[in-house]
């Protein structure tokens, strides 16, 4: 939600954007035009990573205004086929795999087929696992420049998860956690269970098995999903996980507040620009001599894994990293 009363047109949000080369004067000019109802070039050039929300000094959420204008004007020029492909996700079959009574629910959203092999993990043994259309958060529509379906479907998503009766719902996908925390609050929706980020859950389970962990002598780069811009607080758990596993996370240019999109949202509309963004990520990992790139988002993983391997960097999902430490 954009808070017009908080925005002082400082322009720092657009000046920060790593995908356009705006000086402060141009950033202020385009932000003023945007707030006044116009469609400046940034609306179409936006990568939809939401980093401008993160750096806004007044927490006005400028990306949310950009996203609304993208929907109103079609400025992102998303191909119709890409829209249709995403809409098909609403037709995915709903699956509920019952776990131990009283255990948390693990929601896979619509990424089940992407992460199926990752579920063979002792950390998930007792959980009820759900996936499919009934548990689809729809937050991905934001990358298509269409925020309205997210708000429209939010209550349905929350109600379907609540009907499972669990006290805790673990979000495998960062998008779901974003909806159940930040966006639900903005929409005025009550969430009658505790959303648990996958980082928090993994850390909690690793602590229970602390004596079984074998340290991993790895130097890693972490690829942060775009949705993480909405929920920065949980990243403390990632640092704690790395500490438990003995993994080194060296400081680099594109991480934490400065983290880049993986390039996937650009693939349907600007492959050349997407390729450049992907290269920035890989080169940044190489510059700190990372032996592995750790992923949380399945789309980030699919988008960057080949480039990682081509450059001698091992692409590894965070859940697999934890499993390796327990199996070592």
Image (tube, rainbow, N blue to C red):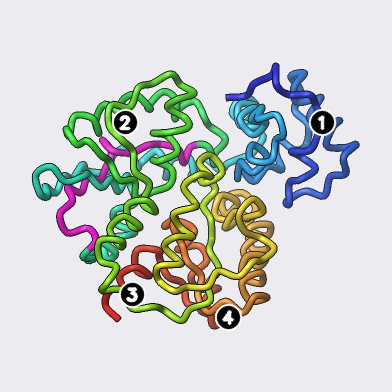
Residue labelled with disc 3 = 325
Distance between the alpha carbons at the discs numbered 4 and 3: 24 Å
Residue labelled with disc 4 = 311
Distance between the alpha carbons at the discs numbered 1 and 4: 40 Å
Q: Nearer the viewer, residue 215 or 286?
A: 215
Residue 210 location, quadrant? bottom left
| In magenta stretch: residue 126 | yes
Is residue 26 shown left or right of residue 229? right
Mark 3 or mark 2: which is in front? 3
**Residue under the point 42% across and 70% down:** 316
User: CB of mark 1 within 8 Å of CB of mark 4?
Assistant: no
Residue 10, disc: 1
User: CB of mark 3 within 8 Å of CB of mark 1?
Assistant: no
Is residue 266 shown left or right of residue 116? right
| In magenta stretch: residue 106 | no
Badge 4 marks a residue whose secondary structure is loop
Locate the C terminus and report the quarter of the image it occupies.
bottom left
Q: Position of residue 275 (x, y in %)?
A: 64, 63
Looking at the rendering, the stretch of residues picked out in magenta corresponds to: 123-141
User: CB of mark 1 within 8 Å of CB of mark 2?
Assistant: no
**Residue under the point 29% across and 64% down:** 118
Distance between the alpha carbons at the discs numbered 3 and 1: 46 Å
Badge 2 marks a residue whose secondary structure is helix
Q: Position of residue 68 (x, y in %)?
A: 60, 26
Residue 157, disc: 2
User: CB of mark 3 within 8 Å of CB of mark 2?
Assistant: no
Residue 283 location, quadrant? bottom right
Badge 1 marks a residue whose secondary structure is loop
Mark 1 or mark 2: which is in front? 1
Between discs 1 and 2, the one toward the N terminus? 1
Distance between the alpha carbons at the discs numbered 1 and 2: 36 Å
Distance between the alpha carbons at the discs numbered 4 and 2: 40 Å
């Amino acid at each position: 939600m954009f808070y017009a009363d908080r925005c002082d047109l400082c322009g720092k949000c657009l000046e920060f954007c790593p995908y356009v080369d705006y000086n402060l004067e141009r950033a202020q000019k385009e932000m003023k035009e945007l707030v006044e109802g116009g469609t400046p070039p940034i609306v179409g050039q936006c990568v939809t990573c939401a980093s401008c929300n993160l750096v806004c000094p007044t927490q006005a959420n400028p990306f949310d205004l950009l996203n609304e204008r993208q929907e109103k004007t079609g400025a992102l020029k998303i191909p119709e086929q890409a829209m249709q492909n995403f809409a098909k996700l609403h037709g995915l079959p709903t699956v509920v795999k019952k776990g131990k009574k009283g255990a948390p629910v693990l929601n896979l959203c619509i990424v089940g087929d992407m992460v199926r092999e990752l579920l063979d993990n002792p950390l998930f043994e007792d959980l009820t696992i759900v996936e499919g259309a009934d548990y689809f958060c729809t937050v991905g529509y934001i990358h298509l420049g269409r925020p309205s379906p997210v708000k429209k479907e939010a209550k349905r998503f929350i109600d379907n998860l609540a009907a499972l009766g669990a006290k805790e719902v673990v979000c495998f996908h960062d998008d779901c956690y974003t909806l159940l925390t930040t966006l639900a609050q903005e929409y005025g929706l009550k969430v009658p269970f505790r959303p648990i980020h996958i980082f928090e859950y993994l850390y909690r389970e690793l602590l229970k098995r602390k004596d079984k962990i074998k340290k991993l002598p790895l130097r890693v780069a972490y690829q942060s999903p775009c949705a993480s811009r909405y929920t920065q607080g949980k990243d403390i758990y990632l640092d704690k996980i790395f500490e438990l596993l003995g993994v080194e996370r060296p400081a680099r240019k594109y991480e934490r507040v400065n983290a880049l999109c993986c390039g996937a949202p650009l693939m349907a509309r600007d492959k050349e620009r997407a390729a450049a963004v992907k290269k920035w990520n890989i080169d940044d990992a190489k510059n700190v001599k990372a032996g592995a790139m750790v992923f949380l988002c399945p789309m980030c993983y699919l988008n960057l894994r080949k480039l990682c391997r081509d450059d001698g960097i091992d692409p590894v999902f965070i859940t697999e990293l934890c499993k390796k430490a327990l199996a070592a």
